Image: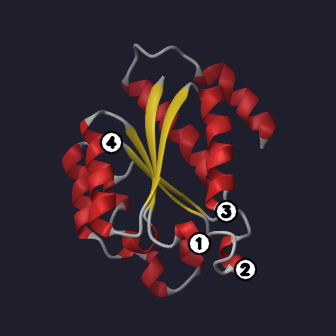
Amino acid sequence: MIPIHVLHGPNLNLLGRREPGIYGTATLADIERDLRARAETLGVALTVRQTNHEGELVGFVQEAGLTGAGVLINAAAYTHTSVALRDAIAGSGAIAVEVHLSNVHAREAFRHVSLIAPVCAGMICGFGPHSYGLGLEALARLLQARLPSLPSLLSDASSDANSQD
């Protein structure tokens, strides 16, 4: 199984009632349920965490990176402000994919800059909860390519996962 930590930053615990015109009506529990179903088809073992505290998020990233797990991260507001989070991704050697529910580039100017993007393998934004599923699949593929001893679960699972979306 491919280990991936899904990390949610501040205020994402309010999904479903927080600005639904921007973030939609899906809750964090809805997103986690969908990710766990997708992870099963991809051969991924998920650890899912949410925190409103920057230092705790930094610790989660370090733990994942130092154990060789991939990181699927929605750092929320910390995306645009946290050098500490950027340094944790780079310093721990974490292979990370940044995700956002909204299209951050179509919003306020301060959201156009991601401090973590330069140390992430990629970014997916603007597809609502589906951003997470796309990010999970991309990250699983990256990890599988770097760990050739893993079984090739993704080739068959990809067609299954695509039919679910």
Q: Residue at x 64, y 55 (%)?
A: 29
Query: Closest to the observer: 42 or 31?
Result: 31
* Mark toward the start of the polypeptide (1 vs 2): 1
Report whether 34 appears left or right of 55.
Answer: right
Q: Nearer the viewer, mark 3 or mark 4?
A: 3
Rounded to the nearest angstrom, the CA distance separating label 3 from label 2 is 14 Å
Position of the C terminus by quadrant = top right
Dot 3 corresponds to which residue?
Answer: 27
* Mark toward the start of the polypeptide (3 vs 2): 2
Rounded to the nearest angstrom, the CA distance separating label 1 from label 2 is 14 Å
Q: What amino acid type should be assigned to the residue bearing mark 1?
A: Leu
Above or below — where is 146 with respect to 88?
Answer: above
Image coordinates for residue 56, horizontal then vertical, percent: 30, 61
Q: Nearer the viewer, mark 4 or mark 1?
A: 1
Above or below — where is 80 with respect to 145?
Answer: below
* Mark toward the start of the polypeptide (4 vs 2): 2
Quick one: SS at disc 4? helix
Q: Count the marks: how many?
A: 4
Dot 4 corresponds to which residue?
Answer: 64
Dot 2 corresponds to which residue?
Answer: 21
Q: Nearer the viewer, mark 3 or mark 2?
A: 3
Dot 1 corresponds to which residue?
Answer: 14
Mark 2 is surrounded, within 10 Å at the Cα level, by few (under 14), some (14 to 19) or many (20 or more) other residues, namely: few
Image coordinates for residue 1, horizontal then vertical, percent: 48, 22
Report whether 123 appears left or right of 157.
Answer: left
Quick one: SS at disc 3? loop
Query: Closest to the observer: 11 or 128?
Result: 11
Image coordinates for residue 132, horizontal then vertical, percent: 59, 51
Q: Nearer the viewer, mark 1 or mark 2?
A: 1
* Mark toward the start of the polypeptide (3 vs 4): 3
Image coordinates for residue 15, horizontal then vertical, percent: 63, 69
Above or below — where is 92 with respect to 37?
Answer: below
